Image (cartoon, rainbow, N blue to C red):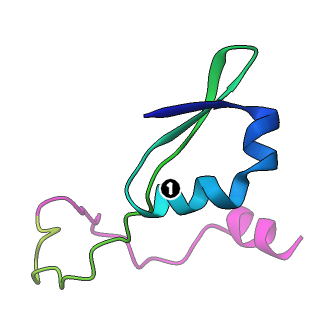
Amino acid sequence: MLQINVHDAKTHFSKLLSRVATGETVVIAKGGRAVAKLVPFQPPSTAARPFGSAKKTVHLTDDWNAPLPKKVLDAFES
């Protein structure tokens, strides 16, 4: 893992991005203290989630579809 100061990071940012793109991690330090870390981007999974995967985690009350109180409706309109 490479550690580099802020000035050098600004000066060589494109080169640092190239290194990160190959899998390397770069730590940026200010006054010798790490303040940021550049890591390779990990795109989120695009795999389909199985139907029903949230079962038993979402709970609706019996009145979930009841009209909202006037006070709440008025707050949306003000």
Q: Nearer the viewer, residue 37 or 65?
A: 37
How far across and down, in percent of the image, does residue 30 sit?
Answer: 74, 22
Magenta-span inclusion, residue 19? no
Residue 30 higher or lower than 72, as above or below: above
Q: Residue at x 44, y 63 (%)?
A: 41
- Residue at left 45%, top 76%? 66
Image quarter in which the C terminus is found: bottom right
Query: What secondary structure is the magenta-colored segment mainly?
Result: loop
Of residues 27 and 72, the one nearer the viewer is: 27
Looking at the rendered structure, the kind of residue marked 1 is: Arg
| Quadrant of res 77 | bottom right
| Residue 65, horizontal then vertical, whole percent | 41, 79
Question: Mark 1, residues whose alpha carbon is within 10 Å: few (<14), some, or many (≥20)?
Answer: some
| Residue found 61% across the figure and 52% down from its top | 16
* Residue 4 x %, y %: 64, 32
Q: Nearer the viewer, residue 52 or 39?
A: 39
Residue that protrudes farthest toward the top in the picture: 32
The secondary element bearing badge 1 is classed as: helix
Front residue of 9 and 49:
9
According to the picture, the residue beneath numbered tag 1 turns out to be 19
Which residue occupies 50% across, 34% down? 2
Q: Quadrant of residue 33?
A: top right
Q: Is residue 14 above or below residue 3?
A: below
Give, as a single range, the part of the protein colored magenta. Answer: 56-78
Name which quarter of the figure residue 47 lies in.
bottom left
Q: Answer with left or right where residue 15 lies relative to residue 20.
A: right
